[in-house]
Image (cartoon, rainbow, N blue to C red):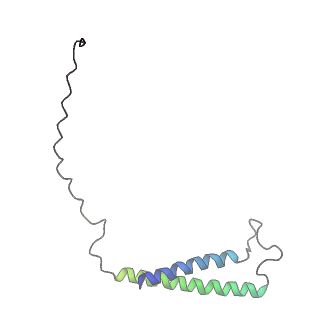
Amino acid sequence: MENVLLVIHLLLAIGLVGVILLQKSEGGVLGMGGGGGGFMTGRSAGNLLTRTTAILATGFILTSLALALIANNQKVSRSIVDQPVAADPAPSPAAPEPAKAAEPSAPVAR
């Protein structure tokens, strides 16, 4: 159930971002919005996008609350932060170093 709700939540978030990006900018700060014709222009398109944004936002908030309630109802004994730190095990004894071969002091005659 939680996974299905999470997938719906993600789809709503992606849809909400898309619908918001389709809307006409009214600030005009960047000089990008409000220009001539476009994909969806006119008053009816604005009403459609506004209504769609409101519906998606409501669904997003409801799924957020539902996911929070599901997470709250799950029985978690302790937090990871509350768990004690395990003591370091005793270090293993150092392995003896291999014996070095004795270097001949005088060259060997052949």
Relative to the observer, which residue lies in front, 75 or 26?
A: 75
Q: Position of residue 40 (x, y in %)?
A: 76, 81
Report the residue that reaches farthest toward the right.
36
Given residues 94 and 22, the one toward you in this image is: 94
- Image quadrant occupied by the N terminus: bottom left
Vertical comparison of 104 with 36: above or below: above
Relative horizontal placement of residue 9, taking residue 29 as reference (left or right): left
Residue 7 vertical placement versus 96 (above, below): below
The residue positioned 30% from the left and 76% from the top of the image is 76
Quadrant of the image occupied by residue 105 = top left
Please provide percent x and percent y for residue 26.
Answer: 74, 74
- Disc tally is 0
Residue 74 left/right relative to 56: left
Give me the residue at 33% from left, 81% from top: 74
Q: Quadrant of residue 39?
A: bottom right
Asked if residue 89 is positioned above or below residue 18 in the image, the reply reads: above
User: Is 104 left, or right, of 81 in this rendering?
Assistant: left
Q: Residue at x 19, y 33 (%)?
A: 98
Quadrant position of residue 57: bottom right
Residue 14: give x, y in percent of width and height.
58, 76
Question: Residue at image x 79%, y 74%?
Answer: 34
In the rendered image, the quadrant that contains the C terminus is: top left
